[in-house]
Amino acid sequence: MLTQKPKRYRYPAEIISYAIWIYHRFNTSYRDVEGILRYRGIFVSYETVRAWSNKFGKSFADIIKKKESKPTDKWNLDAMIIKVNGVKFILWRAVDSNGHELDVFLQKRKNKKSAIHFLTRLLGSYPSPRVIVTDKLHSYTKPIKYMTKADHRRHKGSNNRVENALQPTRRKEKSLIKFKSPSGLQRTLTLMGRIRNIFAVPVDRYKNSASTQKIKFNEAMNMWQESSKEVYCF
């Protein structure tokens, strides 16, 4: 349990981490988190929860990324249109064959230059994969050919793994009514993906028994608490 308080913060690290976890793990808004905490006798405004997420979200995502298991050598890439304050953006996402999210990146275009930028981010963090699966978007073709040695497979039906990974984003968008800023969207989805990687994907309530789910959830919670200690430098 994290009972210590981060320097210059009124609440203990346990409460701050719990609020950040609720917001990014479930389809909740900052006001929803405020209500959940208030029910437990913790009076924190939604603006405070927002400040906590903005302050510590990236640190959590970076630390969890280092603790995650290595991705498989088969990647699935996709791009979706998403509106931020009424303006259209392209959200690029990559997952491995187990559904672990490798990266999510918001850009304004869906062209070759954007594909190169996204692949550069990916290859800067992970070894080049054996296979890359995409839909039939032509922007992928040359960047994948010249930047990797991967077997590029282009078929819409074989890209369901990453298509399914887009669903939590849509659910979060619906719960918030809309995303308010590009930077806020990037921060939120980055940590959402990291948390899903350690809680949702390994636990897998559809395939694992109740006892296995309990073990996997406890392992994920221990990783979250260890990450919290590093974030707050305890």
Image (cartoon, grey):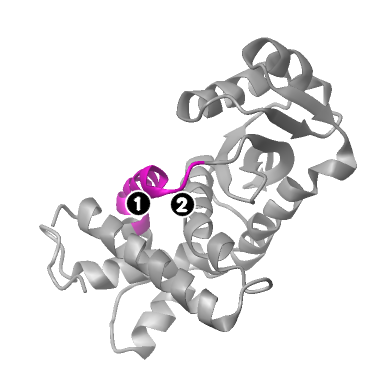
Quarter holding the C terminus is: bottom left
The three-letter amino acid code for the residue at tag 2 is: Leu
Q: Residue 128: image x %, image y %?
A: 58, 24
Q: Residue at x 68, y 73 (%)?
A: 206
- Quick check: marks 1 and 2 in contact, CB under 8 Å? yes
Q: Residue at x 53, y 50 (%)?
A: 189
Crowding at mark 2 (Cα within 10 Å: few <14, some 14-19, many 20+): many
Q: Secondary structure at mark 2?
A: helix
Q: Mark 1 or 2 closer to N-term?
A: 1
Q: CA distance from mark 1 to mark 2?
A: 7 Å
Q: Is residue 125 magenta?
A: no
Q: Look at the picture and state if 128 lies above or below 167.
A: above
Q: In the rendering, which numbered label is found on residue 60?
A: 1
Q: Residue 82: image x %, image y %?
A: 69, 45
Q: Residue 1: image x %, image y %?
A: 21, 74
Q: Is residue 62 magenta?
A: yes
In front of the other: 9 or 221: 221
Q: Which segment is the magenta one? A: 53-70
Q: Badge 2 is on which residue?
A: 191
73 sits to left or right of 54? right
The three-letter amino acid code for the residue at tag 1 is: Phe
Q: Is residue 47 visible?
A: no
